[in-house]
Every structure is written in structure tokens, then in C-alpha cells.
Image (spheres, rainbow, N blue to C red):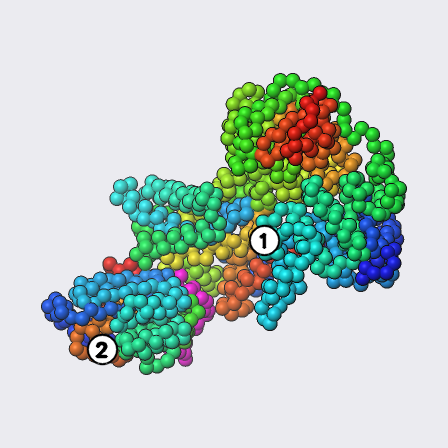
Amino acid sequence: MGKGDDMTVVLALDKITKSFGPVEVLHGVDLELHSGEVHALIGENGAGKSTIMKILGGYLAPTTGQVLLDGAPVTYRSGPEGEAQGVVVIHQEFNLAPDLTVAANIFLGREISKGLGLDHAAMRAATAELLTRLDTSIRPEALIRDLSVPDRQMVEIAKALSRKARVLIMDEPSAALTHREVEALYAQVDRLRAEGVALIFCSHRMDEVSRLADRITVLRDGTVVQRALRGEMTEDGMATAMVGRELTDIFPPKDTSSGETLLELRNFTVQSVVKDVSLKLHKGEVLGIAGLVGSGRTELAEGIVGLRPATGELRIHDRQMNIRSPREARDARLAYLTEDRKEAGLLLDKNLPVNLTLTALDEWGLRIDTKREKAEMVSARKEFDIRAASDDMRAGALSGGNQQKLLLAKTMLTDPEIVIIDEPTRGIDIGTKQQIYHFVRDLARQGKAVIVISSELPEVIGLSDRVLVMRMGRIAGEVEGAAINEENIVRLAMGLEREEEPA
Amino acid sequence: MKRIDLHVWGPLIALIGLFILGAILNPAFLAPANLSNVLARSAFIGLIAIGMTFVITQGGLDLSVGSMAAFLAGITIMAMNALVPVVGENWGTIILGMGVALLGGVAAGYVNGALITKARIEAFIVTLGTMGIFRSLVTWLADGGTLSLDSGLRSIYRPVYFGGLGWITWPIIVFAVAAVVGEWAMRHTRFGRHVEAIGSNDRVARYSAVDVERVRLTTYVLLGALVGLATILYVPRLGSASGSTGVLWELEAIAAVIIGGTALKGGRGRVWGTVVGVLILSLIDNILNLTDLVSPYLNGAIQGVIIVLAVVLQREKRTAE
Amino acid sequence: MKRRNMLKMPVAAAALSLMTAGAFAQDAEQVVIGVSIPSATHGFMGGLNWHAQDTIARLGEAYPNIEFVLATAPDVGKQVSDIEDMLATRDIDGLVVLPFESDPLTDPVKQVKEAGKFVTVVDRGLAEEGIEDLYVAGDNAAFGRVAGEYFRDNLDADAKIVVLRGIPTTLDNERVEAFQAALEGSDKEILDMQHGNWNRDDAFNVMQDYLAKYPEIDAVWAADDDMAIGVLEAIAQAGREDQMVVVGGAGMKDIIKRIMDKDPQLPVNVTYPPALISSAIEMTALNFVSSAPMTGRYIISSQLITPENAEQYYFPDSPF
């Protein structure tokens, strides 16, 4: 394992097709994973990346074609069987039991016993060794529920390692991580590569692909459209290959002018996280809020819309307001679009119209007007370009980008004046990102006031007329106009003095 | 895909199957008198189960309804008896007594709901507690025996259970109206939509400006009111209440809800399915009494099999998706 | 009748000792008697609970040196715990127990006996003989037999009978078997037997179904007055009051009243008095305050209540 020729093909797809019912989603895909190599699979949402990952891991069977492990057709028929043969998948949604310890999760299903009982000491020791190898400070006896999302990701990786992975398949490994944690992840990827593991991941972050991938495969509409080795493709080139057209103007021009103050905070404090924030938000303006994860960005937004108890002064149209619930926020024409689209944004097991109208329903009277609901759905699909097979499909079955557009449509149905969008493009492809950026600017153009909270600096920079940077629950500073650049924002976020005044 | 959706139609098919079985085994089964009996008997559990559908759909549970019915029947009878010297043996007394049942139900439901939503105690624990409390209270009020309605009042009140439009007696009418209104409310009103949304994911509902606590509380109050309504129909039947009134009604109601296709974890409510579930459970009893098919010792086993089957069918639907 | 007379003896003794109790109690040793009975889940048990509490209150006044510990249990497990607690923490000198079920309670009661305590078993015997000092019980076989014999001797030839059974238990089986035995060889026919679980609502449902199923029914053995109430209501609904007679059991006061008033639907009733707990408690108390040892078996046979003798079985104050 891991020895021998670096270019050995471990796992391969041979002319794979996959159909769901009458619809073929993969049209004869070939793919080779080499030991000691990192392979990036990129493409827009719906291009077939997830399906390929699932076929590689044994979670889905191909309709035609073969999956080859060490040159022979694979014998595993399920994820766990694949794991037993060293093919391990780290899913985007983690497979961890929140109430068990790290050690218990890592050995879940393969517990080490001593006589009748469990050998806790041995499992803890083995877990500690794995975690040390990964250079983390996670304790083996910590409960998963007490861990941060990146730490959980590390536990997933440790779990994969403990299963002696020869092939590691990662779906969007960095989607939930912050800047620093991403670096730790990259270090682990490098380490695994050096150990001879074959890695494949998919990602929407072009910088990540450039940094990690030895080999890149670009998918579009279920077909491989381009293959490249490290250094053969620029980030722009990747985006172009994925979308199939030149991507210009990802960000719309900042061409709206701001007017009167719509929202003002004075000494706004959200329990135990956000302290003494004062800000002004104007009509026709896009205000970015940047900062590290944990700096209080989301908590500030949730405090503003009444999801968290807050003190201090909140003024809308220069009138003092007391907003204690999302209902009162809605009535004040204040809307918040959550970062957690799956757990707080959409009812994944309900159909599209139900999701669309949920917030607005209170204004419709006692009875639900189904005709009106249908009509709203039609216009939302048109206005926000929501692509769905049918209105009756579950929201959970939509791609991430379409879910985000549906969430946007749902939020806008209440006709808010002030819109706070938290992580507008998390986990969605570049083409849809571009659409959403234009929607955001359109909102400003319609005279609404918009706050965009994002962990992706290019997004904050490209979208905002003005950027507030948060650090440890406080506003660390503000940059505007030409001063909006990565360096200034990072300095503020890290707590460093700015060297120059904004121009 | 033209496969019959067992999940939706299964309970209805089972109900029709039971009808045919009953008719074949004993011609008396189809007599209007028998059908009228079965439907009227179903009305108590049926009304409660309709309310229970809303509670379960929002992700809650109420174990106290059987005891609550006994308690409400007890205080209703005591109130009516106490009012006789004041108001007299007439409809006035009975209507006041009905008001006691209904208001008592609303109050009892409010207590459950407030403890769950405001004090934030698990629904299971709260209603397990109130189940014991209501049961003890009625036993205590009855001094361990039976509370009986004044016989004069009884004869005036009796037609509320036994009378009606021919074979269609009042309990059947009330049950049918409640079912239609319940289905409409679940499917076509904001309240029903909110109930489903909360059961589906209460966090999403909260973020979507739904007043989660109030909607939850309302479902418990609604259930309490329906228990009160069931009590109004129950009291005239035997004119009595005791510690053994309404024993296990809560489980029958929950079973009917589950058989009808409402998910126990919440998020999807089917009032008409609940009605079918209630009828299935009563028909099994009726058919087993009318025939000598199996030992009466096994009645419970047959109901158990049906409940488990219903849940298995729900599971099949999910994996097929 | 004979056995019943035997019971009267200690009751008379109790009356005697009442007179001396005041003086006697001053310097007497403190005695604790534990009473463990099922809780009031249905009418009959409700009556039994009432009689138990009533007796304890009465005896508590008469004998200040006797302290009673009453525990009611809704299930077998609780009853076992109750008895263990009484022995361990209340230091009882005597135990009066009406076992929920015979087998599970045999061992705990035996331990009380082995600790040297006086044990009185009421109504349901233990699985092992010779544990108890005193046994006071109703006669389940006689309860069924008396009803059966009444039907055999008083119904028309070829009369058709339906039966509502109680909760499936040994006790119910004994009653029903004796009922069937009494009718055996007669020209009366038992059409059907279903469980009404000693519950009004269940009995109502079962009777409704009987009425739908059988066009001709001449007599109903409801085996318990709670069930009889449900049965009567179902018959009234079907308008067939004049077609059949109903015989219940255990002497509920409302039913006794109707028998006294010569209701044609309710010709007779069979006793199974909940008051037997009173006799048991009294006799146990007497064992401690009088010199006469109260041991042996006392079976209170079931009597037929007729309009003529109904008055002596009528207790308007009892909840049952």
C-alpha cells in the first residue's frame, strides 16, 4: 500500500453511464485515480460530480460501464463494503454521531473489545495517535457536538485514515472551513499524498484547485470536457471550461447610489457575542460585513432580526424599533437570509411553493389561496431562474444553487426594504454565483438596502459599496471605495493596525 | 410510474377490505343499525385523533387525552348535578354542562401546551405527568367509584348520543363535520401549513417568521377542545364517569393517526387518513365480536399487526423515493 | 349460609372489644398493620377501597394503639414494592394483602411471614398453601354457579344467553367455568362469550354487537354490575328492553336499588361484596387486641339477591 510506482492507477472509471429513470446524467465518463496524487473534479452544480463520487465510493451502481479497483472490477456494492477495501468517502454532510466521543465515532462499528467490554483505553490511545498525526488539538474524549465544524471535518479525516484508506474521496472538503482551517486541511492533503493515498475532491474554489490538484478533470453536463495536469490551466481557464462560455463580469458594476439611512444601530449588543456595534445602512447600498468565523457576523444579523436577544438601539427610517422575533422583523420590512440553508432556510421535505410562501403566508389571510400560490411560484421561477423538474419536487432535491435562489425568492416575497444575506453563495457553482451577485445588485438598484455577510473575501470585495470588518464581536473598522481590498480587510480582521487611511 | 402509492391508499384499501370481510362473514354487519353503532362509537376516539393529528404533525405528542376525557366527563357530570337545584332539570343545565366540558378541555389543553412551549419541557414528560394527574383527579372526585348523572337530566341529554337524523346519529354528524373541517384546516389554511412546517423543521419555521410557540400551543388547545367535544358526546351514552373511563384512548388515538399515514416524527399530517385509521380500529373490534373468527384474547394482537403494517408501508415509500 | 355465620363470630367479638378498647389501649403496645390492595381502577375495586378506608378510619378511632399503613397499587410491581417497604421501613406487625396476582406476590408475602408477622390474605389465594394465618375470600366459583343456577331454574326452555366476561384472568375463568357447569345438561343455550373487561364502555360495545348479531337473546349474564350498566344502555338503544333479562354481579347500589324496586329487566343479582376487605382488616386487628387467635379460612359465599332480600345488601353511602 502506498509503495511502488507513484503513477499506479488505483481506482478507475471505464465508460461509466448513469441514468435516473429515463434521464441519463453521465454519458460515458473515464477517470483514473493514481496513488500519491490529488485529483480535482470540477464542474457546475448538476454537472455530475456528486454522482461520480457516489459511484466511486460504492454508494451508487453505474448503469453501464465498470469501476476498476487495481485493474479488476470492484466487488463492493455499498459504501461500508467499499470502506472495508480502502475506498473511503468523506461526505459533505458529516457521518458522525453527535452524542458520542471522538474516539467512539472513529471506532464506530469496529470497536476494540477486551473480553465482554470495550477497551476504551486502547481506542483512546489509537485515536490520540491519529489526531496527533493530523496535527490537531482535538481530545479523543471530546463529544462531537462540542466540536466546531472544522474540527468535525478533522475527525472525519481521522476516521478515514483509521480505515487505512487507499482512496479518499472528498466532497467539498473546505466548504465549511475558515481560512486558517483550510490551510490545516491542505497540509493534511499533502501529507496523505506523500503517504501514497489516491485523493479525489470536488470544489467550487478555484484557488483551492490550483493549490492542491495534480490533475484536474472538468465536467460539464455529465461529460468530461477537459483534462489537465498541474499548471496547465489557469483559474479563469477552469471557470470558462466549466461554464462553457467566457465568464466576464462575475460581479456587477457598483453603479447604484446610496440615499437616506434606512437602518441604524447604536451600541447594539447581542448576548455574549456581539458588543457595542454601531452602523448605518443606506437605501440603494450594498454593505459587506467581513470577519473571521466566530467574529460575530451571523450573531449580529440574527440579533437584528430578533432571532437572538439583543440590547441597544435599532432604528429604521430613524424610528426606534424593538424587534424581538422574525415576525416583528418581517413586519418592519426587514429580512434575513440565513447561511444555513438546509437546516434553517428551507423545508427540505416540502415542495417548492410551500417553501416559497412560508414567510409571506401571514399576509394572505386564514385560507391559503392556491391559485395565488401557483402564480407566485411561476413568477419566482422566472425572476430568479429557479430550475426545477416540477413544482412538486422536494426542495431538498434541488441543487444547491437552485435552493439558494428559492431561498432568495422566498425572502423577497415579503417585499422587504432591508435585506441581510448571510453567505449568499456557499457551496454553489460559479455560474449561479454570478447570477446571485446580479440579483443582489438589482436589489440595491430597486432602492433596497442590502447587507452581505461572507467568508469569501473576493465576494465581499466584488459586491460591496462599503465593508465593515468584525473582530471578536466588535466592528474593527470600515473600508470604502478603492480601499476595499484583501489586504485592508485581512489586517482589520486579524486585529492589525491599518497602515494608511482610506482614500 | 403507475405503481399504486400504498402509503396514501393503503389504509383506505385496508378499510374497504375490512368492509368486504365483515359483509361476507356476517350479513348483520351491513345493517344500518350496526354501521351506525360502529360509527358512533368511533366518534370519541375519532374527534380526539383529529386533534392528535395536529399535535403529532407539529412534532408533539399528548398522552393525557384518555385521562383528560375521564376527568372532563367527571367535572361535567358534577357540574350538571350541582346545577340541577339552581337551573332545574332542563336543557339549560345541559348546555351549561357542555360549556364546562368544552372550557375544561381548552383549559386542560392550555396547561399541557403552556408547560411544553413556555416551560420547555418535553411533550412526552408533560403529558405523561398530566395523564396521571387527570386520572387520579377523576378517581378522587368519584371517591374511587363512579360519578353518575342525575337521572332526570340523563333522559333529556340521552338523545345527544342516541338521537340524530335517522341512523345518522349526532356523534356521527359531529365526527364527520370535525373531519371535514380538520382536513380543510390542515390542507388549506395558514395554521395547517404552519403546523406542517414546524413538524418538518421547527428551526426553518422560526427563521421564516412563524410563531412556533403559539402554533404549538394552539394545537394542544385544539386537542383539548376536541377532547371536550368528545366528552359532550360521551356523557349521555352511559351517564357516568369513573377511574376506568377512557383508559388507553390516548394510545388508540395515536395508533389511528399513525395508521392514517401521519408521520410520528411530524411534518406531514393527514386528517382523512386519521379518520380511516379510527374506522379500521373500530371495525376490527366489531368484526371480531360479530364473528367467531379468532379467540377474543387475540383482538389486541390483530390491532397490533395492523399498526405495525401501516408503519412498514410508510417505510417502503421512503426507500422507494 | 353456614360459612357466612362463621364470619359473624369475630365481628361480634370486635363489637365486644370496642367497649373495652378505651381503657385497654392506654398501656397497650403500639401495633402497626399494613394493608396492601389494588388501587381503585374500576367500580368494584373502588368499593373495596372505600370499605378499606372506612374500616381503617373506624378501627383507628376504636384502637388508638393500632396504626394502619394503607398502600394501593395500580400494578403487581408496585404492590410488591409496597409490601417490601412496609416490612423494611414501617416495621409492621401484621399484613392484610389482596394480591393483584397470585404467583408474583407469593414470595414477598412469604418473606413477611418468615419475618414473624401476622399475614392475612384476601380474595385471591397465594400460589403456595399455608403461608397465611388468615384467609378471607369471596367464592368465585359460587359467583358463577349462583347466576348459572338462576338461569337454569328460571328461564324458559331453549332460552338463549350471552355472556360478558371480565378481564382475562384465573378469577374470570373460575367464574365462567362454574357458570357453564351450572347450565350444562339444561335446555338453555349460551350463544356467545366475549370480554367486556369489567368496563362500562367495553361492555356497551360488546352488547351492541351482540344485539346486531343475534336477533333473539333472552338473558345476559354481565358478571359485574359495571358491565351491566353498559349492557342496559345498549339494550335500551336497540329498544329491546322487554326481550331479555340482565344479571350482573357484586351488588352495585344502583342495581340493588332497581332490584328492590322490582325492575323486570333486573330480576336478581349475585353478591361478591367488596366489604370482605373490612372483615379481613377487622379480624387482623382483633388478632392483636383480643386474646382469641384469628386464624383459619373464611370463605364468603355468593348469595342471590332478590327483590325480597335486596334491602340488606343496599349501602347508599358506598361509592359502588
Residue at the spot x=85%, y=45% of the render? A216
Left-right relation of A50 to A297: right
Residue lying furthest bottom in this view?
C130
Foreground mark, 1 or 2? Answer: 1
Left-right relation of C303 to A501: left
Residue span colored magenta? C181-199
Residue C2, x across and y down, in percent: 23, 79
Residue A365, x across and y down, in percent: 56, 31
Residue A206, x across and y down, in percent: 79, 39
Residue that carries the numbered disc 1 in the rendered image: A143
Rounded to the nearest angstrom, the CA distance separating label 1 from label 2 is 65 Å
Label 2: few (<14), some (14–19) or many (≥20) C-alpha neighbours in 10 Å: some
Left-right relation of B245 to C119: right
Answer with the quarter of the image where residue C233 lies.
bottom left
Residue that carries the numbered disc 2 in the rendered image: C294
Is C195 inside the magenta-drawn segment?
A: yes
Is A242 inside the magenta-drawn segment?
A: no
The image shows residue A494, relative to residue B311, as above or below, that is above
Answer with the quarter of the image where residue C273 lies.
bottom left
Left-right relation of A267 to A284: left
Amino acid type, callout 2:
Met
For residue A415, say whether it is visible: no
Label 1: few (<14), some (14–19) or many (≥20) C-alpha neighbours in 10 Å: some
Residue at the spot x=57%, y=45% of the render? B199
Q: Chain of mark 2?
A: C
Amino acid type, callout 1:
Leu
Secondary structure of the residue carrying numbered label 1: loop
Secondary structure of the residue carrying numbered label 2: loop
Residue at the spot x=65%, y=43% of the render? A342
Residue A351, x across and y down, in percent: 67, 41
The image shows residue B298, relative to residue A502, as above or below, that is below
